[in-house]
Amino acid sequence: MSKTAYLAKQQAKKIIANAISKAVDEGKLPKGEIPDFIIEEPADKAHGDLATNAAMVSAKNFRMPPFKIAQAINEYAELDGTLFTKLETAGPGFINFFLSPSYYSKVLKEVETEKENFGTSSFGNKEKVMVEFVSANPTGPMHMGNARGGALGDCLAAVLDKAGYDVWREFYVNDAGNQIEKFACSLEARYLQIYDSSVVFPEDGYQGSDITDLANLYNNENGDKLLNLPSEERKKALVDFALPRNIKKMQDDMAKYKINYDKWFFESELHNSGAVREVVDILTEKGLTYEKEGAVWYKNAQVITEKLLAEGKSQDYINKLELKDDVLIRQNGNPTYFTADIAYHKNKFDRGYKTLIDIWGADHHGHVMRMKGAMDAIGYDGSKLDVVLMQLVKLVRDGKPVKMSKRTGKAIQLADLLDEVPVDSARFLFNTREANTQMDFDLDLAVKQDNQNPVYYVQYAHARICSIINALKNDGITARSLTEDELAVLSADEEKNIIRHLASFEEEIISAAKDYDPTKITRYVTTLATLFHKFYNACRVKGEDEILTQARLNLCIAVKTVIKNVLTMFSISCPDSM
């Protein structure tokens, strides 16, 4: 919450505590310990700006009805010098606070002073946090899940940064292991088929047309020079040609999507450095591996069972999970993806990150407990690994599911989406639904330039304010800084509703950071735009009264500031005209 909103809540707590103390001294309340009580914003502002349950929770200690306690508190409450004008008792014993005009003035002065820093807090205390997101397989194009994960991950990182964390964005490139071998075999088959159509394609190979395109591209540039080479040399040459191109395309797509990573981390680094082998050695030293049928296995079931039992879970609960052990080293001597993933998360902790946040598809649900358990098993704190599971995206046009690109006639990939949909729309719309909910992405809505499109709606509010400022400037009126007393003329409900919402910005940022939910901020700014449009329709900015005109102009500028703070935080453009 803003400094002013925080001050108001602190004052409210002090008012209640002092009133109870005086009521006890005067014999209106019996002596008793004051229990913890809350100060909160009621859903209906007609009942007050803040409310407390202090009388309700004190009934047992004071052995009195809550309403009687509330009356006593109200009688001895002193509001002089505070941000409140009055208290009221309601219902069975709730106490409602009504804010004074100075509260609203102070909030606007706070926005004016802090400008682009308004909403920023030190809540995270500069704790080092890594957000790893997208991390798509480099053997093929990025898909709609990556589109959603990119927007969610990048905007979550932005929220954490605004909340005072030291944030690092990372993309994990799986450029080693079984999928690269499959990639190589697929490329080899498509390359050989250029010269011999009878060559059999691997049963588990990658069937996408992108594999054929890469093989043809290599052939166009290099011809048949690989035909007579041994298979391993041929596959290596094809992978060395194709993989950097795929990775470069991924990096270009992410840049077009306005996502800039601090690091693209390559799985091959872990294999080359011996880090993958090291985690196997650590687990073996701890007695958590065994050999079976030529492979090295990790005692996942044992680790998870012991952890859950320690947490108080029943054996029946654990049995229903049907826990299984995991292969670390295959019969052929190659580590599994799971082994490399353990090494990668160990590497993250070793780099000093206190909290690791991964954005994964919901199909990785079963992997969460395994990875947390593995972190505990190798001596790290698995509870510091937080995974945001993201549900599927369904593209919709004309109310019907869409699977094929109109441009290419093939399955829609991230690149196709960004060719068709403005990046601002994609980033905003993907952050209008929580990660754990399935999402219909409406392609028609995303390209609309009207108020049905939420990002346009918010951008238009910003542009409308710019237009108001310019129109007033043409009339010789420019904004000047007002005193708190001058700003106190803003007394209409539409004005106060906006200011209350502005005051909650910092609190919303912190809440979004705590819950790993950037959609709270898109909802916040959409509501702010709605409140502004209501104000604009109800209150004329330019009027006969110079002070009121200036106060409303100051209010407009405060709204403009906060809308811009949100949109720029999410790397969404903030146009001055539309």
Image (cartoon, rainbow, N blue to C red):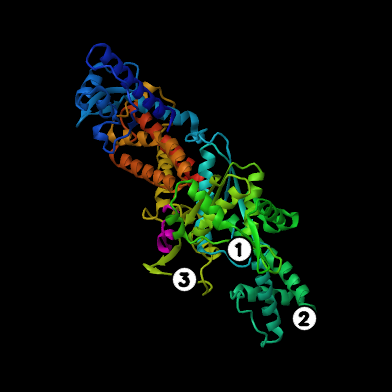
Whether residue 36 appears in this view of the structure is: yes
Quarter of the image for residue 485 reads top left
Compared to 426, does 24 lie above or below? above
**Residue where numbered disc 2 is placed:** 227
Which residue is pictured at 52% across the width and 39% down the height?
162
Give whichever of 474, 147 is nearer the camera. Answer: 147
Check disc 2 and report its element: helix, strand or loop.
loop
Question: Which residue is the site of mark 3?
Answer: 403
**Does residue 441 show up magenta in the picture?**
yes
Span shown in magenta = 432-448
Q: Is residue 193 left or right of residue 54?
A: right
Nearer the N terminus, badge 1 or badge 2?
1
Place of residue 213 in the rendered image (x, y in percent of width and height, measured from the top left): 64, 74
Q: Which residue is mark 1?
A: 137
Discs 3/2, front: 2
Assign a secondary structure to mark 3. Answer: loop
Q: Amino acid at mark 2?
A: Leu
Q: Position of residue 51 (x, y in %)?
A: 29, 30
Three-letter amino acid code at the position of disc 3: Lys
Q: Earlier in the sequence, mark 3 or mark 2?
A: 2
- Can you tell which mark lies on residue 47? none
Task: Determine the residue located farthest toward the top in the rendered image.
Answer: 26
Count numbered badges in the picture.
3
